[in-house]
Amino acid sequence: MYYDVFMSFRGEDTRKTFTDQLYKALMDEGYQTFRDDNEIERGEDIKSELNKAIHSSKSSIFVLSKKLCNV
């Protein structure tokens, strides 16, 4: 599968707030968006699946948690 956007995020404080909203907005606009919560099945090789998704995406968005960055 090919993706318009590969979303990478870190931090529980963004997972159910900003990241969910951004994912929904991208999908609503018709952008095929990879997010590991939705695309990787339990039992699959995570590293391999992430590598495939990264290489089959046109662009990437990285979401960093304020808590993890100590900002």
Image (tube, rainbow, N blue to C red):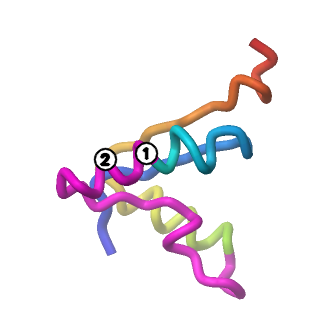
Q: Which residue is mark 2?
A: 25
Asked which secondary structure carries label 2, the reply is helix
- Tell me if mark 2 has few (under 14), some (14-19) or many (20+) residues whose alpha carbon lies within 10 angstroms of its own: few
Asked which secondary structure carries label 1, the reply is helix
Q: Decide: marks 2, 1 in contact (CB < 8 A)?
A: yes
- Marks 2 and 1 sit apart, C-alpha to C-alpha, by 6 Å
The image position of residue 21, as x and y in percent, is: 43, 45
Magenta stretch: residue 43 in it?
yes
Q: What span is colored magenta in the figure?
A: 21-45
Considering every residue shown, the one lying at the far top of the view is: 71
Looking at the rendered structure, which numbered label has been put on residue 49?
A: none
- The quadrant holding residue 47 is bottom right
Q: Give the number of marks.
A: 2
The relative height of residue 3 versus residue 60 in the rendered view (above or below) is below
The image position of residue 43, as x and y in percent, is: 71, 87
The image position of residue 4, as x and y in percent, is: 28, 54
Q: Amino acid at mark 2?
A: Ala
Q: Amino acid at mark 1?
A: Gln
- The quadrant holding residue 36 is bottom right
Q: Quadrant of the N terminus?
A: bottom left
- Tell me if mark 1 has few (under 14), some (14-19) or many (20+) residues whose alpha carbon lies within 10 angstroms of its own: few
The relative height of residue 62 versus residue 30 in the rendered view (above or below) is above
Q: Quadrant of the C terminus?
A: top right
Q: Which residue is mark 1?
A: 21
Considering every residue shown, the one lying at the far left of the view is: 30
